[in-house]
Amino acid sequence: MAKKSANDDPLAPLTLAVGQEDLLLDRAVREVVAAAKAADADTDVRDLNPEQLQPGTLAELTSPSLFAERKVVVVRNAQDLSADTVKDVKAYLSAPAEEITLVLLHAGGVKGKGLLDAARKAGAREIACPKMTKPADRLAFVRQEFRATGRSATPEACQVLVDAIGSDLRELASAVSQLVADVEGTIDEAVVGRYYTGRAEASSFTVADRAVEGRAAEALEALRWSLATGVAPVMITSALAQGVRAIGKLSSARGGRPADLARELGMPPWKIDRVRQQMRGWTPDGVAVALRAVAEADAGVKGGGDDPGYALEKAVVVIARAARSRGRG
């Protein structure tokens, strides 16, 4: 989990998120943006990569406004900034502007260490976002995810979840959210086992990814393996729904950079890139057909049909066909 410094005000003039765990970095950004928009709904958010932050750009973004508007300026991969831009950032740190929150995302390490040191010297609010390479770290992350929702999970349940999901923090966080939404009371080992045993080999997200890519045979193979190894059918319909909705959201959005679309659609930038690749064969009619198929499958696995497996197979075939609807007469 991300570790914060003693200064825990998300509206501090400078937030420094250090590490290479994308989920934690994205959460650090979302926390600041949410706090800023809570203070001022018209907050202007600028999410920049090193190529977009040229010498002089930061001065333009942080110059006084006639309307004294609140701004959040996010700089990703700050360790890759050019030497001239680093000089601009250091100069800004010595005299930060009012109503502006600067968020620096830095990988840590030797590269760009001068900027890292300068930000710390300037009293930055720091959030550690390290890669969680140890099982114990991932276990602590899962426990914290449950605590953050106000729900109770046994130590055995947390361990089974980590063993089943693996090292992907996004999937671990998603699994916790799904369990909290579906299960009442304390979440124990038996509950997690029913949902996730065998899931490391063929996850519900694998089924969904292959389906929305139009790869019906691979999606069906992953589906059958998932069901055979104990993945709960409701988890698969949930993943299918997420996959199709993401296609629909992105296809109806105006073009733009992943960071801009991520803010607009509520997706992390990495997912924007993935969905862009998946949506090439889709049409609006195809999305509508796929969503109806998911709704029918969801009803089937929740008691509306005699065979949840058949309901899911039918949905997967319909979705895969819809993924290839562009170009068909």
Image: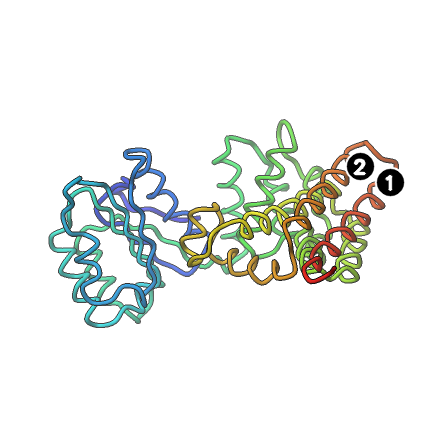
Q: Relative to 311, is 151 on the left or the right?
A: left
Residue at point 59%, 48% (across, down)? 248
**Mark 1 and 2 residues: CB-CB less than 8 Å, in contact?**
yes
Q: Which mark is residue 282?
A: none
Q: Residue furthest right?
A: 306
Point out residue 50 in the picture as x, y percentages from the top left corner: 31, 66
> Which element type, helix, strand or loop, lies under badge 1?
loop
Residue at point 59%, 40% (across, down)? 155
Q: Relative to 216, is 153 on the left or the right?
A: left
Point out residue 62 in the picture as x, y percentages from the top left corner: 18, 52
Point out residue 98 in the picture as x, y percentages from the top left corner: 16, 43
Point out residue 296 in the picture as x, y percentages from the top left corner: 76, 38
**Label 2 CA crowd tier, 10 Å (few <14, some 14–19, many 20+):** many
Q: Residue furthest top?
A: 185
**Disc 1/disc 2 C-alpha distance (Å):** 7 Å
State whether residue 220 is above or below residue 113.
above
Q: Which residue is mark 1?
A: 307
For the C terminus, the image quarter is bottom right
Along the line of sight, the residue nearer the viewer: 10 or 131: 10
Q: Which residue is mark 2?
A: 300
Q: Residue furthest left?
A: 95
**Label 1 CA crowd tier, 10 Å (few <14, some 14–19, many 20+):** few
Residue at point 26%, 67% (across, down)? 113
Q: Relative to 90, is 226 on the left or the right?
A: right
Total marks shown come to 2
Please, what is the three-letter code of the amino acid marked with disc 1? Asp
Please, what is the three-letter code of the amino acid marked with disc 2? Gly
